[in-house]
Image (cartoon, coloured by chain):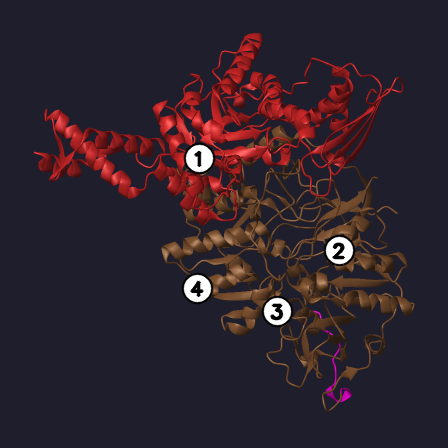
Chain colours: A brown, B red
Amino acid sequence: MTVKTVINAAGRSVPLEINGQPVVPFKGVGKYKPVGRKYSPPIPTCCDYPDDGNKVVGSLAEALQKCGICNGMTISTHHHLRDGDLVSNKVFELASQMGIKDLVWFPSASFPCNDPVIKYLDDGTINRIEGSMNGPLGRYVSEGKMRGTAVLRSHGGRVQAIQDGEVKIDIAVLAAPTADSFGNAKGTGGTSACGVLGYAKTDSMYANNVIVVTDNLIDLPCFPMEIEGNYVDYVVVVDKIGIPEKIVSGTTEITKSPDRLLIADLTASFLEKSGILKDGVAIQAGAGGTSLAIAVFVHKILKNKGWKARFGFGGSTKYMVKMLEEGQMGYILDAQAFDLDSVASIERNANHIPYPVYNAYNYHSKGNLTSMMDIMILGATEVDLNFNGNVVTHSDGYLLHGIGGWQNCLNARNVILPIPLFRDRIPVIVDEVTTLCGPGELIDVIITERGIAINPLRQDLIDSVKGSGLPLKTIRELKEEAEKICGKPQKPDFEDNIVAAVKWIDGTVIDVVRKLKI
Amino acid sequence: MKKLVAIAGNAGPKVRSDCEITLKINSEGGIIVDLLSKVKTLYGESIVKLASEVLEFFGIKHADVRINDSGALPFVIAARLEAAVKQLIKTDVDYLPDFLIENNYSSDRDRFRFSRLYLPGNNPSLMINAGLHSADGIILDLEDSVAPEKKAEARILVRNALRQINFYGAERMVRINHGEEGLKDLRQIIPHNVHLVLVPKCGSVNDIKLVEKEILDIQNVFNITNQVFLMPIIESALGIENCFEIARSSENIVAMAIGLEDYTADLGVQRTFEGKESFYARTRLVVAARAALIQPIDSVFSDVADMDGLYQTVLTSRALGFEGMGCIHPRQIPVIRQGFAPDETEIEKAKKIVLAFESARQEGLGVVALGSKMIDPPVVARAQRTIGLAIRLGLIPANWSDEIPLQRNQVLKKTV
């Protein structure tokens, strides 16, 4: 079957229809403004729920049946349990046993622990995944084995799709480290603590049916609740919702790689010399080894200068907690806790606050936290000569990562990508990205071990570091340097079949991933 | 029995930027390349083409080549294949990748050798970015970091690295093996702009003479005019006893280092953090080097996680008179550099002494005084040396004395 495609505003060939539903091609940053009213779930009536508030049912299978699980439904889960999640796979195991077909799995992200769902994709229980696909799942999709077309959205794009009704969740199955029988739930406490449950919050408010699954049922009220019981239909108690050591890394550690430390060092000096890093700054950095090293170097600068960051937006780590506790950061607004120190800090520090993504990343919000951030440290698998970024495929064409909050974070004032110039002979700076995830107009600075390239659109930044002694180069010079060392790479061969659509934060299609010719 | 299958290079779950070549030469069937590579999509064609070129260069027309690649750069693949070929056939020719013009720089006798970074000679992944870490010297090591059965392939890899990797201005050094293996190393590396050869386990003048003669022979054959400097490493009791003679045994010797692991083993004692057991050897080596007008260089500090310990050791080392130290991890480089550089107090004191000396000289005074204190000529010399060092390290500008006219006047008044 051939699909009608058009060239979108980013110059990419995209379809007008995905999985039988019409879609809007990307129109440019901030150009697409849908009208109408937000989607809303059916109106519930409180008298249909137990007066004593006890919504506990015998098993997850029973809860799914009570929710009326049937063919073609959309089931959502969250990824706060990360690689230790025991709940998502269980849902599809049960659905498969019940003979249900053609489900759409709508996770906030998937992890290697979710690879077993491949057998439910094979047997037709699941038609497609609309969410991130890593490792073997990505490979499965790239090789054209999934029945439906995958849809990749950012964390904020997922909220947008729920709010504008692009995705209607039939059943949200929400794993909760602690919950009460009414369905109030939080991310702390118990043996499977993950810190926060922000990604699940939107699901709880918009899904037709909501099931809370916990291994730590406590007496009412579960406080402070992130998921409110008033949105919840059923509560299921299981032995274990997750494997603790895989939920959060016991500890996140800064990189030991001398090359990555060099990049981190260079990034910190860029932040300092450009004047972006200053008293009262708002900053976000991830949990990767290089980002952590940058956080440590930035902390040192703040300390030496006697400055204090107004707030940090997490992905929180122990290094951010250290800044908070030593007085170099006013608040941590936290969408997810990456290590045990951060989980503990949420309970210990009043200024370490769970902060749901729909307040930070959502296109249908009346403003967002990300556009108020001064410093945003992100990664990429590829960046091209126009500063366009790719985070979902590798240069060999395989889909290997989700978008996460990456696209949403591009709205920050200064978007900085500290990346190696090449990884095991694979150049990171290329002529044209394999898959476009973020338009170059939003990406400001590329920092590699062999030099810094500033987007020509940011003349102010270029001026700010003139004469600073920093190794400034053009992005073309960096690309040529990489190719001189690694050789000019060939391009992967694709078939016409579209295996995944990449959505922009506004719900339009910015690019697609095609099936690899193998 | 003649060897039929050759294996060269490295593969395995932890190996990166390298490849393992399995080569079998056949009598018919042409060249068949079996490529297993994570960059096959991006570089598959060019890898197969390179392999065919290398085999053709050595006159091999029929062979099975299996390449298990983890992202090796072309010069690495070529080196591994050449090593495999040379296990199977006898040949005098070398497959040389292009020599980068960026690598065409020279060194000089008095350049800083504060930090010199050791790189295992058979591990390409550590070499590629080594020059980015601003070490004064990069040492491609063919000796202790290379297993005996890997010496031949490491030599070829190091040779190609010297031609293909940009070390961004670092002094290009190679540590050769002791004895006959070391002479083989020289034949492979000297024609490729090696600035300095480290001569390990140097026990007597004869060790230097052998190396020097071999280098001279190679230089004559290849018509090389660049001087190749030598840095003997003294690693035994005998070496310490002979170190002054060794130090002045060749005009090519610019520095002399001590290797404490072997030295303490030779003495039959433990190497300690305090280093009392090697105090005599270190001071003796410093004195011998100074007497021979070359740089005394200290042993490496082996705990790469202990930066405070390293810094303390550098300070001790500097206090004993050493002018540099080996590094085994790039993160040690800035610590060593900082440790050997004069600190602010030293520089300020040296400035005052030098200014006092200058003004005394201008006024024709025979005696230099700073305040009420008389300054002896050796003190002036040391201060001048500190200032020279600070200027070369970029800690103060070369015209520093122009910028402080006020202080100059104050000093003048005091000296009158």
According to the picture, the residue beneath numbered tag 2 turns out to be: A151
* Foreground: disc 1 or disc 4: 1
Mark 2 and mark 4, same subunit? yes
- Which circle's residue, 4 or 3, is located before the other in the chain? 3
- Which circle's residue, 2 or 4, is located before the other in the chain? 2
Q: Contact, CB < 8 Å: mark 1 with mark 2?
A: no
According to the picture, the residue beneath numbered tag 4 turns out to be: A326
According to the picture, the residue beneath numbered tag 3 turns out to be: A195
For the residues labelled 1 and 3, the Cα–Cα distance comes to: 50 Å
Residue B278: x and y in percent read 44, 38
Asked which secondary structure carries label 2, the reply is strand
According to the picture, the residue beneath numbered tag 1 turns out to be: B298
Question: Can residue B168 be seen here?
Answer: yes
State which quarter of the image contains the N terminus of chain B: top right
Mark 1 and mark 3, same subunit? no
* Foreground: disc 1 or disc 2: 1
- Extreme residue in the left direction: B416
Q: Is residue B198 above or below residue A178?
A: above
- The answer to whether residue A482 is left or right of residue A240 is left
For the residues labelled 1 and 2, the Cα–Cα distance comes to: 60 Å
Asked which secondary structure carries label 1, the reply is loop
